[in-house]
Amino acid sequence: MKNEKNMDWSKLVRECLDSTAMAVLATREESGVWATPIYFSYDKEFNLYFISPAETRHMKDIKRDQHVAVAIFMPSSASGIHQVGLQMDGKATMVPDKQIEDIYALRAKRMNRDIDWVPVPMEGHFVKEHGGVFMKITPTSINYVDTRYFGGNSKRIPLEKISKA
Amino acid sequence: MPWKPFKTYSEKGRHIISDNRYMVVATSDKKAKPWAAPVFFAYDSKYNFYFLSAVDSRHAENISENPNVSIVIYDSTSEIGLSDGVQIEAKASMVDEKDVARVIKIYCDRLFPNSDVPATQRYKPEQYSGASEFRFFKVQVVQTYVTGVDRRMDVDLADRDGED
């Protein structure tokens, strides 16, 4: 069991976020919840970004309720050796037009792709060429799971420590 | 997962499920706030899914308040743009005590396929019953969707029509 006071939370969170480009987004529905796999990128404050068409089920859910949850697990977890992952509560919002180019650059870098087109913000924040909407998830809480250090228990990460890192 | 042609989306869905051992269970609390938790899973021949969790975990507490859950199974190691997945609407509940030994067998066959240790020796049923700290949960599928690039298909996982 590792001493939590000595944990470099930013490093651990980044290790997990860098290990995979896929996350599962949970959105609220009338009778429960809906889960969707998304490709994500993230910024230095650990806000997550994804693109989805406006007519998808999870985007309609978000339009009704911005509260979302996200789960990310390191691919090595699937081997069953160690389980390492993040669970987040967050708020999903559309990326403002003026930030779309920066967020797109972040995504292109993440996907190891050249910026082969410049996203064109349109009314409602649609990006014409892609047919999708750039979305931002601002974490309101982050739980860290790591069987290497904490057994099966998750640890709540103090957000003020990682956002200033 | 290497690319492979499938005759039906049902076959593709079954392949994704059999190739992966981790799934994300999305639940919601009594205020309808969503939560997502990755868990190891096993499944039976009728595609009921099973996982083991602490009773006081947030997702387990949510299930006691609202059994309607959603599940995603995907290959987290796949390249960007090439990943397919299975999305499931389902109802989750704690496994009945009378079924615990049977579920332990299913769970161990899946997670420890080459082990000589008997399942109920590895997980003793009495330790996963009653007021135990950890319990098995069952997920009964209501609807399954197989996702691919830019599309999502309704499937019946048990439907083998059109396959050899």
Image (cartoon, coloured by chain):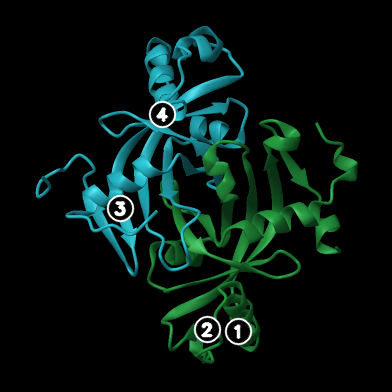
**Type of the residue with mark 1:** Ile
Task: Please name which of the two marks, 4 or 2, marks the residue nearer to the observer.
Answer: 4
Name the mark on residue A125.
2
At a point 56% along the width and 50% down the height, the residue shown is A75
**Distance (Cα) linking label 3 and label 4:** 23 Å
Q: In which quarter of the image is residue B132?
A: top right
x and y percent of residue B155 in the render? 23, 50
At a point 46% along the width and 25% down the height, the residue shown is B112
Q: Is circle 2 on the same chain as circle 1?
A: yes
Task: Please name which of the two marks, 3 or 4, marks the residue nearer to the observer.
Answer: 4
Callout count: 4
Task: Please name which of the two marks, 3 or 2, marks the residue nearer to the observer.
Answer: 3
Name the mark on residue B145.
3
x and y percent of residue B89 in the render? 36, 45
Q: Is circle 1 on the same chain as circle 3?
A: no
Which residue in the protein does label 4 denote?
A: B110
Q: Is residue B53 above or below residue A28?
A: above
x and y percent of residue B97 in the render? 43, 12
Q: Is residue A7 above or below residue A134?
A: above
